Every structure is written in structure tokens, then in C-alpha cells.
Image (cartoon, coloured by chain):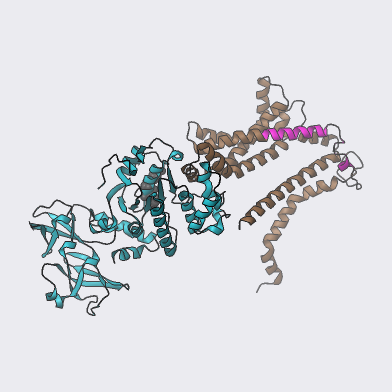
Amino acid sequence: MQTRPMRWLRKNVVVLAGVLALGYLILPNLVVLAFSFNKPKGRFNYTWNHFSTDAWQHPCGVADMCGSLTLSLRLAVYATIGATVLGTMTAFALARYRFRGRAATNMLIFLPMAMPEVVMGASLGTLFLNMRIRFGFWTILIAHTMFCLSFVVVAVKARVMSMDPRLEQAAQDLYATPAQTFLRITLPLAAPGIAAGALLSFALSFDDYIITSFNAGNTVTFPMFVWGSAQRGTPVQVNVIGTAMFVVAVLLVVAGQLVGGRRRGART
Amino acid sequence: MTTEPTAAPGDAVRLSALSKTYGSFTAVHPLDLTVPAGSFFALLGASGCGKTTTLRMIAGLEDPTTGSVALGGKDVTALPPYKRPVNTVFQNYALFPHLDVYENVAFGLRRRGIKSVKQQVGDMLDLVQLGGMARRKPHQLSGGQQQRVAVARALINKPEVLLLDEPLGALDLKLRRQMQLELKRIQTEVGITFIHVTHDQEEAMTMADTVAVMNAGRVEQLGAPADLYENPGSTFVANFLGTSNLIEAEVTGTSGGDIQLVAAGQRLTLPAARCGAEVTTGGRVLAGVRPEKIALVHRDDEDAIAEGRNRVPGRIVDSSFIGVSTQYVIDSPVCPELEVFVPNVERDGRLVPGAPVVLHWNPAHTFGLDAAQDIDAGLDADAVEAALSPDGAGTAAEAAV
Ligand SMILES: Nc1ncnc2c1ncn2[C@@H]1O[C@H](COP(=O)(O)OP(=O)(O)OP(=O)(O)O)[C@@H](O)[C@H]1O
Ligand SMILES: [Mg+2]
């Protein structure tokens, strides 16, 4: 005979584990959210003082913060576009064609993911220095595009490899030229992989600190700004930006789910 | 046995010395084949004999190792698939998973720049009885429904040649019959040339004008279904298409149009016209006879058998009643397992396992084959097939009855 609490546990253990994991993930975000409404007593926003919406009303009220934020967003968008285009093409080449150095390329693509960021950032910095390239926006962009590339290649390649080549053959059999086949069949089928790669790239580029700091020169990205100000006292606005980012991301995901769900529902 | 390619523009498909080699493995040996325009042509063979490979070379999806493909008198060997007036129903359907049924079916029309596809697609979906499912995605369909979408998607383009790679394999028996009739009707109506690949011999025989039996990358024999059945040219065809009793016999001489044979002391007669093999007195030959051509009497009634018929003694090993007929397995000195199908008109109660019997048949129903071949060729393939297809076990019997 099982006791009642045991039975309850058996039934709800999955839910319980899920709630705990979710709590573990969300709790820090909730703290950030709460402290975005704080009015700290000193320069550090670590202890609760009293409620205020000042920071939300003046999100750019801190010198240089919004400039670094715009810079980071721009970098993330460009790096995402660059890495997604290059990475998708690389993934197709690796998945579809046999050529000399294919195995080596496959290995090298993994390197940026496997290598410690410090090592990569430092060596990239040395390279730029030796090539006498001035540090700044472009060096950061090159660095970001490089490490995002690996993630895009991996995501897209997995998708392309699992695609049935007979679908493209069927399209060609139905009078689609190679270009039409790519646009109508290949690309839509690979789209989830490409989207995953792009989202990952954006997130990785936006919050990268280590590699950026080796290649930025005087340029200050948002993560670098947060790090820098944390030495002297963090402004509440950082929490505002953090919370806003979190909410936007959640809304995007929810919207995606809703659209997908509606489409799936309409079909049945 | 293949037909010689001749340069007739009326031929929908002409394959000349077409072959395909993967590394050291030859999937299709040099193949010469002509399919007349408007005909229903079946490619029949066991799994792995090269049927799909042949179709793919016609469609342009596989580069032939040697040889050429001509469609409607034009050489298309160098043309890419999208420029060939051919459509394929793929063995695994290959439906586009991101498009719904409607868009799948409309795909070919749209690629050719046809704007108003609604009417055509609607008609085609009604034809394959999927009218209500136009907005479903392929993964929301059953296997049989997917298969019908695949047929509709190819058929709607009214190509010169439609290639069907086992298009009905996943359907249940009833739907399969229905689709067979439907396909046949469409084919006659629209006048499209069909090349239909199947490993179901019954399907091939009921649907096709011409059947080519393939074995291990070669076409063994080609002809009208009844012709193939009555006059198999090799042991493979004899065993693969229905059931055959093959008796190894020695040639004792020829008289008139007949060849005299002796097998285990029994004299048999074989019409010379029905023997494809070279015969010399003292040589060996395989005498074949279909199970339904043989009559069975109890040994006590042997005297009632008319003169001039081939007769063989034996003992019933097994009998199974299958409704329209009873199938007997006979152990005889000439062959350890002779099969006899007797229609259930008047059943003789003495014909039970163990009973001594005499088998007799009209000598004109005997065919002769070269004794140098493997007498069991095609039997294993048949067994595999029976295991694979849901009604495989019944087809041999049904075809023979
Ligand atoms: N890409 C390939 N590489 C090597 N061998 C292949 C390749 N494609 C097919 N084959 C071989 O060629 C032979 C013929 O294959 P094919 O697909 O034409 O058979 P099939 O007659 O259609 O069989 P089934 O009835 O099972 O569909 C098989 O033995 C198969 O293993
Ligand atoms: Mg096949």
C-alpha cells in the first residue's frame, strides 16, 4: 500500500521538477526586475531602499549607457546577419558537397566553440595588433561574426543533414529549376535551423564581454559598460534594460508559439 | 530477352544500353527497352533488382553509367529532370512537408507558370478522394492518403510519361483494387504512358499491357501478361510469376512437332514449339506445367485417363482447401513437390494426404526450359515478397486460379 503523499508525489513529480527548474532559471530575473524599481541609498543597487519608477521614466538617464546599448544592438544585428549568411552557406557546402579539406573544415568550425574565450579574444587581439588594424567597431564586428559563425554552421548543418534529398529531386521532377527548388523547398525546410542559428548569434553577440574587451580599444559595448560601472556603482537603469530585454525575448517566444499553434490548429 | 531498339517516333520511352554501376556493383545491366506511347508498362521484379534505379534514370534523377534515354523520339540523356516531360510518383512519396496537400498537388502547375490552378487541383483531389483534406499537411495524413497525394501531384501535370514507383504499396487491399482500376481508367482516358514499378505480380498482370520481369539488374523476359504466364522463358520467370512445376527430364527423341521425354521412367510429351531450349537426344531439359493445368485422380481410376495425356504417379503429401480450389502437394518420383490446384467442382473423398494418385495433363500445356539454369530461381525472391506484401501469400494462388 502506498501512502497518500507518496501517490501524490508520483503523480506530480514531473510538474514539481519543472517548477523547480523554472524557478531556478527565473529567480535571478525576478530579482533584476524588482531592483529596477529600487531607489538605492548609495551608489550600489544591492539593498532594497524604497519603491520608485525613476529609472523606468529615464532609462537613458545615465551618461553613455544608451550609446553603448545602441552600439551593442547594432553589433548584434550586423554580426547576426553576417554569421547567418556565411554560416548557412558553409553549412550547405559541408553537408552537401565532398571537397578537399572538408573534414578539416568540419573540425575547425568547432574550434571557436571549444576554445576558451580568453584565449580566442587575446589571440584575435594580437592578430589585429600585428596587422596594425585600429581597434573599434569593425574589429569587434569581425570577432563577433567569427564566433557566431560556428553556432550557425552547427545549427543549420544538423537541419540540412536530416533533410531528405528526395524532396529536392521531387521538386525538380515537378519542373522546378535549381533556383526555384532552393527557394521553394530547400530554404523553407532549412529555415528552422537558420532561425535557431540567427537567434543564438544575436544573443551571443549582444552579451559577449571577454572577446570584445580584447578587441574593443576605446569602444564601449553594453556588457563592457555594465562591467565598468559595476566597479563604481551600478545605475538602476542597467536593471531596466535587463528587464526590458527579458520581457521582449519572452514576448517574442510567446508570439512565435501562438502563431505556430494557430497555424497548426487551422490545419486540423 | 529484350526488344531491339528501333527509331520509331511513336515510342514514348526508348532505353538503349542503359546501365548503372555503383562502385563495383552493377545495379542495372545494359538495358534495351522500348515502351510504346500510350501503353501501360509494368516493371516487375523482386526487391533490389534495379527497378527504382531504372525509373530514376528515365526521370533524370540518376546519371546513367552508359547508354541513353529517349522520350518521344528525342534523346534526353543530357537533360536535367525539370526539363523532361516526365513525372514520378516516388516510392516513399517525397511529399513536401511544409506545404499542404493543395500546394503539393499544385506545385508542378505553378512551376510551369499556370496561374489558375484551383479547378484542376480540386478535380484531381476529388479523383483521389481527398477533396476534404486540401488544407492538411502531409504529416496529418495516413500512409495511404499520402500515397494518393503523391499520385495526384504527379498525374495533374499530364506528363508524356508517368513513372510510378510502387505507388500502391501502402494501401489496403480494397483501396488498392480501387486505385488500380482508377489508375488504369485514367491511363486509358488521358492516354498517358505509364511505367509502373511493382513487386506484386498480380498487380502487374491485371494492370499492364506489357510486363517486363527484372532479375538482378536484367530484364529476364518481356511480354503481354498472359504470354509471360503461359510461356515463361526462364526458370526465374516461371517461378516468380505464379507457381510452376518444373520436372527435370531426359530427351529420348523427337517425333512430328513433339519432343519425347523421360523422367524417372515416366514418358512425357512436350510440344517443340513451346520449348525455348536447344534439345538433343540424350540431353536434359526442364518440363514445366502450371498447377491449375493438372488433373488429379486416385490411382484406382487410372484406367479412366484418356490416351495421349502426360501422366505422372505420386502420393498426396498435403492438401489445403481454399474455397474455389483445393491445393495439393504431391510427392512423385519425377519431382518431390508437385503442386496441383484442383477446382472444387466435384470433390473426390479419397483424395486425402497419403492417397496414391495419378496426375495427368494435356501435353500441349507443357513448356520446356533450358536445364542448365537454377531450377529454384525466383523461388526465394517470391518467398521474400510473400513475407513483405500483406496479401503476398494469396497472389500466387489467385493468379493461377
Ligand atoms: N546510391 C547507391 N549506392 C550503392 N548501391 C545502390 C545505390 N542505390 C541503389 N543501390 C543498389 O542497387 C540495387 C537496385 O536498387 P533499386 O532501388 O533500383 O531496387 P528496386 O528494384 O527498386 O528494389 P525495391 O523493390 O526494394 O524498391 C540494390 O541492390 C541497391 O542496394
Ligand atoms: Mg524501388
Chain letter of the cyan region? B
Q: Main secondary structure of the magenta part?
A: helix
Spot occupied by residue B373 in the image (x, y as percentages of width and height): 21, 52
Residue B42 colored magenta?
no
**Numbered disc total:** 0
**Quarter of the figure with the C terminus of chain B:** bottom left
Task: In the rendered view, tell whether residue A140 sits above or below residue A247.
Answer: above
Residue A22 lies, in percent from the top left, at 72, 53
Rendered image quadrant of residue A6: bottom right
Residue shown at 31%/66% (left/top)? Answer: B397
Position of residue B323 measured from the top left corner of the image (x, y, whole percent): 32, 73
Q: Nearer the viewer, residue A62 or B15?
A: B15
The brown-tinted chain is A
Q: Can you tell which quarter of the image residue A106 is in?
A: top right
Q: Is residue B13 visible?
A: yes
Left or right: residue A156 compared with residue B380: right
In this rendering, the answer to whether A7 lies above or below A18 is below
Q: Is residue B333 above or below residue A176?
A: below
Q: What residue sits 15% from the left and 55% below the top?
A: B273
The segment highlighted magenta reads A54-79
> Residue A67 in magenta?
yes
Q: In the image shown, does A221 or B85 lie closer to the viewer?
A: B85
Q: Is residue A157 visible?
A: no
- Left/right of residue B79 with respect to residue A177 in the rendered view: left
